[in-house]
Image (spheres, rainbow, N blue to C red):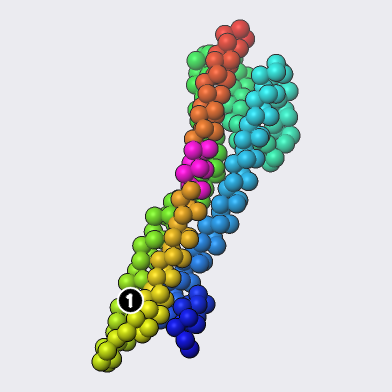
Amino acid sequence: MTVTQDLDFWSLVVHASIVVKIVLALLLAVSFISWVYIFRKGFGIRLARAQTEQFEREFWSGNDLNALYQGAVAHRHSIGSLERIFEAGFREFSKLRGQRATEASVMVDGARRAMRATYQREMDLLERHLAFLASTGSVSPYVGLFGTVWGIMHAFRSLANVQQATLAQVAPGIAEALVATAIGLFAAIPAVVAYNRYAHDIDRLAIRFESFMEEFSNILQRQSAVR
């Protein structure tokens, strides 16, 4: 082949050493998985934000809490995270309120603990796969660099028996090695961007959840005082 053919992308991949091919296959697989998680997480966060906004409108519009609770129970498998937090808190509050000897502070504390437990579960669901994106963004460039270093070593070893090395002889091997670094960056950059964006969005949702729990606890405190 000519030097131009040797520097064609697919030719570089085909003629790369076995170690570099393994590195490329690993990086491409990780990149594919990260893109799947990027799209899934993006849709999931948008849905969580929309469900949160809808429930906040219903809650602060003055609807009866019992009616909201019954609606949440009836649609338990399709409601959003904030509505699940509300359901857990109101369910615990109603159970303790049915026990006439229970003090008001105990009822509110029980509801707050129930909401906090549900909050943790919902945050775990929202943050699922973020660690994979973070790992992809931080590790992929180094994996690609390993493939590059190995490819360069392989290229120079192949020149050991050549009396006079020329650029035409060295360039294809170096280019093969650099492909690994390029693929590593291709896998890392979208993962880093997505991780930073989604982590920020999830933090904003977490703040809204925590604010709601505090405000709802105050409402339950007032209701427990007039039972």
Q: Is residue 70 above or below residue 47?
A: above
Residue at image coords 58%, 57%:
36
Q: Is residue 14 above or below residue 88?
A: below
Q: Is residue 40 visible?
A: yes
Residue 168 screen position, x and y as percent: 38, 83
Q: Main secondary structure of the magenta part?
A: helix
Indicate the quadrant where residue 212 lies: top right
Q: State left or right for residue 79 relative to residue 161.
A: right
Query: Does 221 lie within the magenta span?
Result: no
Q: State left or right for residue 49 relative to residue 145.
A: right
Circle 1 sits on which residue? 152
Query: Does 201 lie within the magenta span?
Result: yes
Q: Quadrant of the C terminus?
A: top right
Does dot 1 land on a helix, a strand or a loop?
Answer: helix
Q: Is residue 170 visible?
A: no
Q: State left or right for residue 187 relative to residue 164.
A: right
* Amino acid at dot 1: Ile
Residue 190 screen position, x and y as percent: 50, 53
Residue at image coords 36%, 76%:
174
Most foreground residue, 117 or 158: 158
In magenta, the rendered stretch is 194-202
- Number of dots carrying numbers: 1
Q: Is residue 46 above or below residue 130?
A: above
Most foreground residue, 80 or 156: 156
Most foreground residue, 96 or 202: 202
Residue at image coords 50%, 42%:
197
Q: Is residue 93 above or below residue 192?
A: above
Indicate the quadrant where residue 32 lies: bottom right
Residue 211 screen position, x and y as percent: 52, 23
Residue 102 screen position, x and y as percent: 54, 16
Local crowd at mark 1 within 10 Å, few (<14), some, or many (≥20)?
Answer: some
Residue at image coords 60%, 51%:
39
